[in-house]
Amino acid sequence: MTSKFANLRPAFRTAIAMVTPSANVVVERVTTAILSDFPEVSAHFSRTPVYGSRDLFPDDYDWEGMLGAATLLAQAQPDIIAWNGSKGAMLGLSVDQEFCRRVEDKTGIRATTSTIALHSALDVIDTRRIAIVSPYMEDYQQKLVSAFKRQGFYVVADACLRIDDNLAFAAASDTSIAEMVYRVAEAKPDAILTWCTNFPAAFTLPKLEDDLDIPILDSVSLTVWNALRLTGHHAAEASRWGRLFDIQFNSAC
């Protein structure tokens, strides 16, 4: 029997759903801040277990947890479901493409991820020469750098804060983020990635971009940008959040 409450969300409104790591406190902050420029768009969140300093699934996703979170979000009938987590960059793009396939097969709702958004942005600005800034420990950072290299990117510089606890990533200061960005900028990359969705870099990036004249792509901002454009919104309305939001083009997940 069909619920009398089915399809009550107004057609002219957009709902963006995000799966986020359980210890993440940055995704909601950045997403809701950016979407304040889009009163017609609402954000909805669900969590999958990712916390502490040990990854229980180092070489894959916790598919049960992630698909469970996506299934709960699907009950709100969003227009898109996004994985707002950065691990896919280390695992490889094909794993995030598999996430999209599984979510779409299970829910019938379009899906995307932070890593897919990153590849889309790097394709449109036509660069493979990047620098990476993160809060990670050096061993994880080197796995991340190696993964980008395997995917055809030239990593000219990287810097990390050597933090090993997922929740503690969010405590990175504006000063420490800026210092790392300025340091890797000396290698003159075509783009700088601030990579980790519990890394509060988005708030510092517009000023840093103005100072350096280099695009800076933040993992959380990328996910919001991609969700907006895939649901038909003019992301440039949020251009105060960085040059990324001036990128407009059409592509699939």
Image (spheres, grey):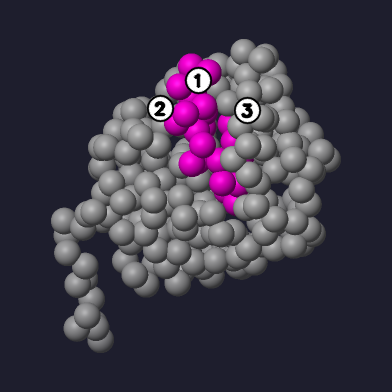
Inspect this view and state whether residue 150 appears. no
Distance from Cα at disc 3 to Cα at disc 2: 16 Å
**Amino acid type indicated by mark 2:** Arg
Distance from Cα at disc 3 to Cα at disc 1: 11 Å
Q: Which mark is residue 211?
A: 1
**Amino acid type indicated by mark 3:** Val
Mark earlier in primary sequence (1, 2): 1
Q: Which mark is residue 181?
A: 3
Q: Which mark is residue 130?
A: none
Position of 249 with respect to 93 (left or right) is left
Inspect this view and state whether residue 64 appears. yes
Front residue of 171/190: it is: 171
Q: How far across and how far down the image is residue 218, in percent?
A: 52, 37
Mark 2 lies on residue: 243
Which residue sits at x=75%, y=56%?
165
Segment colored magenta: 193-217
Which residue sits at x=54%, y=54%?
26
Residue 226 covered by magenta stretch = no
